[in-house]
Image: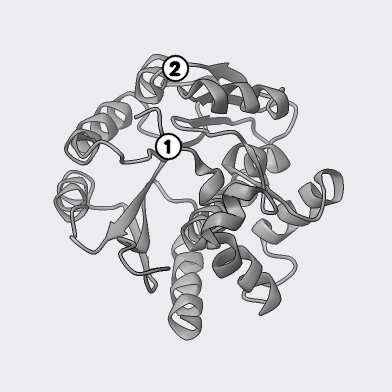
Amino acid sequence: MLSYQHAYHAGNLADLHKHALLATALDYLTRKDKPLSYLETHAGRGLYRLDSPEAQRTGEAEAGIDRALTEHWLPDDHPLMTALTAIRASRGPRAYPGSPLIAAHFLRPEDRAHLAELHPAEHDALRQVAGFANLYRQDGFAMAQAVCPPTPRRGLLLIDPSYEVKADYAAIPRHVAQIARKWNVGVIALWYPILADDRHRPMIQALTADHPGALVSELGFPALRPGHGMIGSGMFILNPPYGLADEAARLSAIFAARL
């Protein structure tokens, strides 16, 4: 569980999907003049370098955010593009924000953030860039259970595990149900990989049975290299903000046309 480091995968097609929806949701939520809470169960290091040896080793950013920028997949005023532009202006042209810094771009002084990251090196790196948030070096689901319902009660929780442990797929529906009972007004967003062996499918079937009104956004793409198991990206979102289903449909059309 502690071996996963997102630096090898930052800016890939799955990040593009996840972060476009996250930025769109936060952009909408922060338009209203009421404070909100932002939570993450698996925050990572918060900031990545696409010119790092790790990113260059896999080439996933080149096939993801780099290609999307070159081919103008998203308009300049898209919430993800505005966040990326602002972060690169201060952090450098090859910086790529993880979800904590994308959230920080939208959060206001009256908002509150709670970020959990268990990996010791990733947590130390997160501390360098996430002074805006309450940080927890503990299991992210335990943090969410302890904090929810948060104050303020409006807000969004991002669940983004590494799925290195196959038992995660079976446990997540229970975690989501418990958190949703405590925080029935919260936007609860779960990212999951779509793998060639379809191991995610029973988890999504259980989640949709428990939460029939949720938004499910799944985008497919070719395996990056021979033997690479991920062939798509999924987002399961409870209480999706207004307009997020339209954004998911736009992303689906873009991926279908480009890949």
| Label 2 crowd (10 A; few <14 / some 14-19 / many >=20) | some
Measure the alpha-carbon separation of dots 2 and 1: 25 Å
In the depicted view, which residue is nearer to us: 186 or 12? 12
Q: Which residue is mark 2?
A: 147
Q: Dividing the picture into quarters, in which one does residue 29 lie?
A: top right
Task: Determine whether, in the image, residue 123 is placed left or right of residue 72.
Answer: left
Q: Is residue 152 visible?
A: no
Q: What's the amino acid at mark 2?
A: Val
Helix, strand or loop at label 2? It is: helix
Evaluate if marks 2 and 1 touch, with contact meaning CB atoms under 8 Å apart: no
What quarter of the picture does the N terminus occupy? top left
Q: Residue at x 75, y 69 (%)?
A: 76
Crowdedness of circle 1 by 10 Å Cα count: few (<14), some, many (20+)?
Answer: some
Point out residue 203 in the picture as x, y percentages from the top left corner: 19, 47
Figure check: 209 above or below 74: above
Q: In the image shown, does 248 or 120 lie closer to the viewer? A: 120
Closer to the eye: label 2 or 1: 1
Which residue is found at the position 31% from the left and 52% from the top?
Answer: 214
Point 47% across, 24% down: residue: 119
Between residues 132 and 183, which one lies in front from this camera angle? Answer: 132
Viewed as shown, does residue 72 lie left or right of 36?
A: right
Q: Earlier in the sequence, mark 2 or mark 1?
A: 1
Image height of 11 relative to 6, above or below: below
Residue 132 higher or lower than 189, as above or below: above
- Is 213 on the left-hand or right-hand side of 102? left
Label 1 sits on residue: 4
Identity of the residue drawn at 21% across and 40% down: 166
| Residue 197 visible in this rendered orientation of the protein | yes
Which residue type does callout 1 highlight?
Tyr
The x, y position of residue 95, in whole percent, is 73, 49
